[in-house]
Image (cartoon, rainbow, N blue to C red):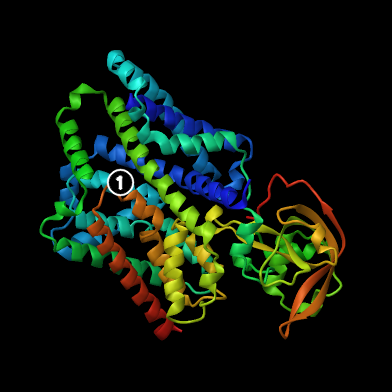
Amino acid sequence: MSKLISFIIILLFGVYTFILSVTNGLGFYIHPRYYEFSQFGTYVCLFVGTAGIIYALKTFKFSKAKKELFNIKTYIPFTIFFIILVIGFALPPTTLSSRAASNRSSGDTLVGSRDSLNESIFDVFTKTDTSFTISDWVKEFAVNRNLPSYEGRNVDVTGFIYRDDSLLENEFVVGRFVIRCCIVDATPVGVTVLADDFANYKDDEWVRLQGEFIIEERDGAEVLRIIPSDITIVEQPDSPYIY
Amino acid sequence: MNSILQDFITIVIGITVEAMPFLIIGVLVSVIVDLFVKPEWLVRIIPQNRFLSHATISLFGMFMPVCECGNVPVARRLLMYRMKVSHVVTFLLAAPIINPITLISTLEAFNFDPNVAVFRLVGAFFVAVGIGIVISFFRDQDSLITDSMKEDILHCEHDHEHEGHHTKFEHGLDTFQTEFINTLRLLIIGAMIAALTQTLIPRSILEDIGSSPVLSIIAMLILAFVISICANVDAFFALSYANTFTLGSLLTFMIFGPMIDMKMLTMLKNTFTPQLMIIITTFVAVYSIIVGLLINYFYL
């Protein structure tokens, strides 16, 4: 009976990762460079699970299995798998929350070096400011820390709202998580907004932010802030992370 | 959903989904070794000399570049083939780092200083071989593995004596199912522990001490233990701290992390005794700290 349950679990993990793959759910958990690895694992689980169930049924002793079927002790060793599979199938993939962003934030939100974002920096220079994504602003900031060069430039980005302890009460960040490998290394990056009507915007809401950069002084140092001209609540995009 | 619960579930599933393909590769290698490699072949290729035998085994990962999760089923298979515990420990510690994928990713991440990849490789070699040699002086190597592992070894020997009962394919299915389920169970538990820690402890607590040559190393050691990230890509994660943490602490992270973390310790719970796990963790931590200190005080 245990053998049969094990192969069923293997098959179900294959089905779960297959569903993640075809519904674009993998991107919520891993970097795209690992998609092929995940698909390989999926096909192995589907094959081994199916072949294993046939094999286990072939060697099944029905009289013994009948006793084990209704004995709860048979299922206890597999509890943790049942929990994960139920959660996985029942709940849609979600992003990390604004709480995780606050926990992982290093205060200076326009961080991230060119080396940590895979695309070339040079395509940034061919774009107009209002077509810059958060990823593009981070890439430019990695090579250009001359703050006056940002002053007055227009911003039009989409991200989720989170707050950091180092910010003032009327400030919040519009950002996204950068993933290099998988969810464990997800680090928030974004632009900091200075908004009089800050209370209208809640953590975790996805917004489209339009505004322009200004330079402010905080604790004797210059920092960049966005004065918004428009903040519109939007749906979470299908691909919420930056890779 | 409550945000703590949301983050916890997301991280647990994320670690499981990310690690599972590598675990599968490791189990497949273990199955192939079980079906086609005779135990006596391993005895022939490993030198008798204490240093050379551990040095040779530390290079096995060059032929098996998987995430460290995938090495656990292979290590268990080697134990079932009566390889010495000290040799298996060296393999487990060295394989995640001394392999082409980790070498390439480290060179790519730290392309501004290729010496980082060299320090990582050499540091890992001496840590893995050194600890293996220390453990080899234990006269009763069997006392370092758990009773359940000993049962699995006996079960494996029994299976090899009675191979006629199954086809090779059916035997392979049995082996896959046993190794995969046992190791995946521990991977998920390890993921839960890592997720709990990451959800509840803010990273900023560790980042405040990044510039100190000594405290930065301790902070990176703790982060490496908690974060449980794969060796193939941890160099990019470490790179994100390059502006705030000392280079020595990043090396400590990249040597200690692939060898010892919450996920790995949980996965090895049914294989090695707590005594051995404490010895390994302590030695790896001390050696990694020494490497970090040497870099911080003598390299730059």
Q: Residue at x 18, y 50 (%)?
A: B83
Q: Nearer the viewer, residue B203 or A133?
A: B203
State the image coordinates of residue A133 (x, y, percent, origin top left). 75, 59
Q: On the rendered structure, is A132 left or right of A242?
A: right
Q: Residue at x 37, y 45 (%)?
A: B186
Tag 1 subunit: B
Query: Which residue is the site of mark 1?
Result: B74
**Residue type pointed to by label 1:** Val
Q: Residue at x 79, y 63 (%)?
A: A126
Q: Quadrant of residue B284?
A: bottom left
Q: Quadrant of residue A201?
A: bottom right
State the image coordinates of residue B102 (x, y, percent, origin top left). 43, 59
Q: Which quarter of the rendering shows the N terminus of chain A?
A: top left
Q: Residue at x 51, y 58 (%)?
A: B198
State the image coordinates of residue A239 (x, y, percent, origin top left). 68, 47
Helix, strand or loop under label 1? helix
Q: Is residue A55 visible?
A: no
Q: Is residue B242 visible?
A: yes
